[in-house]
Image: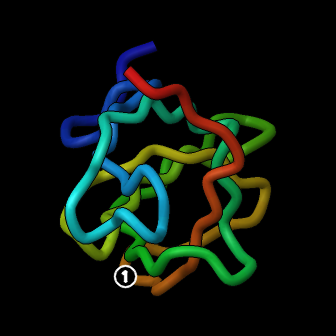
Amino acid sequence: MKLPEGFPARDTIKVLPIKAAEALKNAADILVRPEDVIIGGEGAPATVEAVLFEGERYAVKLTLGNGQTLRVFSRVAVVPGDAVRVVIRAGWRL
């Protein structure tokens, strides 16, 4: 399947703080898979940039507060421009 132009790859690499106490001085590259991200809760703020319906779910392109993009899956429809919060449940340090 070809993604629309501007959609990030299925698995994306983000630069995230290692620990909250070290967030000001240390960061690490983290591999984040779309299925490990939840839209909602009290997570990090993000803006919906694009949405693609894939049958049983939506593929959503988000821009995080630091400007990085993130692809996530959602069973709930969102609209470009929506302000949402995201929780990353799992990731792999590279």
Q: From the viewer's perspective, is residue 21 above or below residue 51?
A: below
Q: What residue appears at the point 37 percent right and 82 percent down from the top-left corner?
A: 81
Q: From the viewer's perspective, is residue 9 above or below residue 23?
A: above
Coordinates of residue 2 in the picture (x, y in percent) = 36, 17
- Outermost residue on the top side: it is 1
Q: Nearer the viewer, residue 81 or 24?
A: 24
Q: From the viewer's perspective, is residue 24 above or below residue 2?
A: below
Q: What residue appears at the point 80 percent right and 39 percent down from the top-left corner?
A: 56
Residue 91 appears in which quarter of the rendering?
top right
Is 92 displayed left or right of 65 in the figure? right
What residue is disc 1 on? 81
Residue 55 appears in which quarter of the rendering?
top right
Query: Which quadrant of the rendered structure holds the C terminus?
Result: top left
Q: Amino acid at mark 1?
A: Gly
Q: How many numbered discs sit on the rendered protein?
A: 1
**How packed is label 1: few (under 14 Cα within 10 Å), some, or many (20 or more)?**
few
Q: Nearer the viewer, residue 2 or 62?
A: 62
- SS at badge 1: loop
Q: Nearer the viewer, residue 35 or 20?
A: 20
Coordinates of residue 23 in the picture (x, y in percent) = 34, 66
